[in-house]
Image (spheres, grey):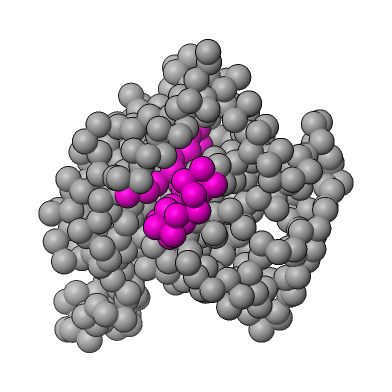
Amino acid sequence: MCDTTQARTSTRFLDGTFRLIHIPLHLYPTFLQPILQVLLPQGGDDSLAHEAEGLSIDNKHGFLNISITPVECSVVCHTNWAKNVFEPVIKRLPSQTAKTVTISKDRYLILSVISAGMDAGSRVMDLTSPLALAGVPIFFITTYYSDFILVPSKDRQTVVQVLLARNFEFDKDESAYVSPSALSHVRGKSQSSEPPSTPPPSNVAELQARTFDLLKKRNVVPYISPYLSLVQCSGRDPSQLVDYGRRPTLSRHSSGNGHHRRSWLDNVDTKLYTSLISVLAKQPRFLSITLAQEDPPSLLLDREYLGVFGDSLVGDTEGDLVPIFLDLDNLPLEATGIVSGVAGRLISDMGMDETVSSELSYLSTARAGAVILSSKQSRKALEILKPLLSKE
């Protein structure tokens, strides 16, 4: 296992607020156009001025996640994009149909977390447990490069208190909260200015017990989708791409006055995006794409579609990851402890196996969660989870 004494974690809030959008799978074709609109932002287009408030100066998303799973289609996007792109489509639907599509009432902040010297399972646990113990509901997204945690914007101060209580210090140079060592040996209690209706658990064991009691009460049954195998990959770093900007001006848009205006296309791998559009048009069984301003695109992808992307992906394309799905439709968004409770129980019951801890990752979507392990470990994990959640 990793030497946690050398682990260093950097955590910072991304700019802006974000919403979670749940789209039933049968309505996916209706929402394909707005999904593509947010995936392909057109900087400099005056008609998108409101949406562009969620983009960086070089027309990149601060954060965007689009996930299609066997449970739902889920989108995490900047509040402006939710309001100006998705809401108008929902309003055009018949009233009963529109009620099946939801945009979270709460606005969320996103924590970007980079942990050096800490394996995947430890990251999931050490980042989520303290927040759950403080009564903060979270969504957790593991990507090829980073981990991202969504927290309600109203809980920002509680999150900061949790970080400070765990020996994080604010680094002005990095604009981030930095911990020089592993997180798991320090825990301070923190209370929100709006305490939850049920007091948060006092320790990890109680947190896990409450989590499984809640899941069992709400009839959540873990399952594996047959013949679904995933790979975790990344698009290429822009620095590895050919600088098409040095080619003749035929490849650029002219502003008409002799100057050439750069497009967001100048900064992305067009082959990757063309492949993404092709896969999205097929309504894949599973695809999760995450765009973050400082990272190349990260994909968790059904192996079936690897061939579409050709050489535009890097990473372990020979991987064989299998997700265990938890349909959380019957749980409120403000439910706490799901990620850390499930992940912690698996790591504990599987004997703190080094392979399990290094492999385990988690994907939160609007109405579901997925624990992701190798195919062999997923089968073992399912054998552990099913008895815990079955009603006798």
Residue furthest to the bottom in view is 246
Residue 342 falls inside the magenta stretch = no
- Indicate left or right for 67 with 189 as reference: left
Who is closer to the viewer here, 212 or 219?
212
- Indicate left or right for 335 with 384 as reference: right
- Indicate left or right for 176 with 344 as reference: right
List x then y, in percent, for residue 379: 34, 38
Q: Residue at x 24, y 78 (%)?
A: 241
Q: Does 311 sit above or below residue 39? A: below
Q: Residue at x 27, y 66 (%)?
A: 315
Q: Residue at x 25, y 44 (%)?
A: 229
Residue furthest to the front in view is 351
Q: Does 167 sit above or below residue 152? A: below
Q: Quadrant of residue 143?
A: bottom left
Residue 373 falls inside the magenta stretch = yes
- Indicate left or right for 52 with 301 as reference: right
List x then y, in percent, for residue 187: 76, 59
Question: Does residue 107 appear in this view?
Answer: no
Q: Residue at x 56, y 63 (%)?
A: 112
Who is closer to the viewer here, 123 or 293?
123
List x then y, in percent, for residue 62: 51, 62
List x then y, in percent, for residue 146: 48, 64
The total number of labels drawn is 0
Please state the extent of the stretch shown in magenta in the rendering: 347-374
Question: Does residue 4 appear in this view?
Answer: yes
